[in-house]
Image (cartoon, grey):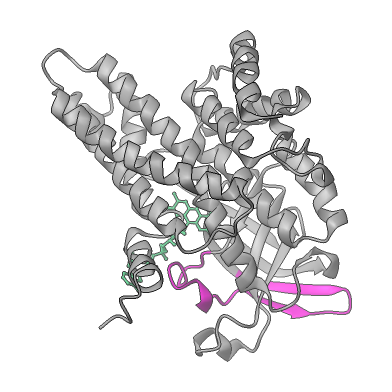
Amino acid sequence: MKLAEFRPALDAWLTEHAGELTPTEPGLDAAMAHLSTVKRLAYDAGWMRWGWPERVGGLGGSPLLRGYLGEALTARGFVEPGIYSLTEVLAPTMIDFAAPELAAEMVPKLLRGDETWCQGFSEPSTGSNLASLTCRAVATDTGWRVNGQKVWTSLAQYAQRCVLLTRTGPPESANSTDKHRGITALFVDMDSPGIMVRPIETMHGAPEFCEVFFDDVDVPVSRTLGAEGQGWAVAMDLLPYERSTALWHRGAFLHKRLDDLVREAPDGRLSARDVGAVLEQIYAFRARSRTTLHRLDAGEQLGAETSLDKALLGLAEQSLFDLVEATLSDEVAFGDSPTDAEWRSEFLYSRAATIYGGSAEIQRNIIAKRLLDLGAEA
Ligand SMILES: Cc1cc2nc3c(=O)[nH]c(=O)nc-3n(C[C@H](O)[C@H](O)[C@H](O)COP(=O)(O)OP(=O)(O)OC[C@H]3O[C@@H](n4cnc5c(N)ncnc54)[C@H](O)[C@@H]3O)c2cc1C
């Protein structure tokens, strides 16, 4: 199906099913349960399958179709883009690197909302410097035995599976110039014996990410993503996906919230100039992200240039919520009035927009070194 047919047909379906698709309860547990419902309804009606390859339960067609589905769902307030985004972040790399039969078995469960997956990359001493990770996997007769810790693992407490980066090369390679080698990616069942998940309460009030501990966790060899030692390539495949369709959906959400702000602002509190300044940032991001989606559609390999998308998204998100805070009551940022709860949560979450998916400083380093060839840091 082409985008021109997909859009009106999907819009009509969303309007018809708005009652079932509209969330009714606050809180992360309710949002996760509702997300599963939305994905199941959209999958069973076919919408959630467009833009994904047939070999993983999809109906084929352009990734632009997935881009529009997520945009339409977020812009109508049917899903929250942060929790929806993990599908777009994790499924493409699973398709690229898992054994075909494993991808065919697992990806439909994620698309249909039967399962949640998480991304186990960051560690207590390894965030920006991802290649120095130390969570260790040692070869056994049947696969791997994993020991170590991950942190900031979004939605791990709900997840049935984890895309996990481990060190399988010599331990000293974590600190050597060779650190990109010796990393292996695994697809781990979260109910495996030896995994403990501890949610972290965030300042925006939702325990959205977790610490995850691995204590002698056995993982079958069939769950290796790519070959042993190819984990860095898996990570470099995944991160650009994290900065493409997933961010496009977030941009649609920002646009919707700017519209909401214009509607809700008390008379005289919002100037056209301030709205224009934020709109400009949102459009700068959306124009850039649109190009990225079209490159994905053309089958191009995404890479370091998606750091521009992430940098622009961070600016747009924080400008919008700075304006929210300046426009609505002082309660928005630091009060506890229930009427402001949604704006407050989003304002506080927006502080993380320059951290999640790679910090703003790291994106600017990548842009400087890899895109502008400005050389090494002084
Ligand atoms: C909401 C949210 C969700 C997340 N979800 C996940 C998830 O699901 N899975 C996962 O694996 N991780 C997740 N993360 C973690 C995220 O990827 C890391 O927080 C991020 O990569 C930064 O790493 P760090 O927190 O260790 O900070 P650090 O790397 O310690 O950086 C601290 C500060 O130093 C700066 N800095 C570091 N190195 C340099 C440098 N070379 N040059 C200039 N400045 C530098 C950084 O920009 C930052 O400001 C999430 C984070 C957030 C906020």
Q: Residue at x 85, y 65 (%)?
A: 222
In the picture, measured across the screen, residue 42 lies left or right of residue 205, that is right
Quarter of the image holding residue 54? top right
Q: Residue furthest left?
A: 268
Q: Residue at x 53, y 52 (%)?
A: 242
- Which quarter of the image is occupied by the C terminus? bottom left
Residue 340 position in % (x across, y down): 30, 23
Image position of 205 with respect to 90: above or below? above
Q: Does residue 272 show up magenta in the picture?
A: no
Image position of 213 with respect to 262: above or below? below
- Which quarter of the image is occupied by the N terminus? top right
Residue 73 position in % (x across, y down): 55, 26
Observer able to see residue 244:
yes
How many marks can you see? 0
Q: Does residue 142 show up magenta in the picture?
A: yes
In the picture, measured across the screen, residue 71 lies left or right of residue 164, that is left
Residue 370 position in % (x across, y down): 41, 71
Image position of 119 with respect to 297: above or below? below
Q: Residue at x 65, y 82 (%)?
A: 182
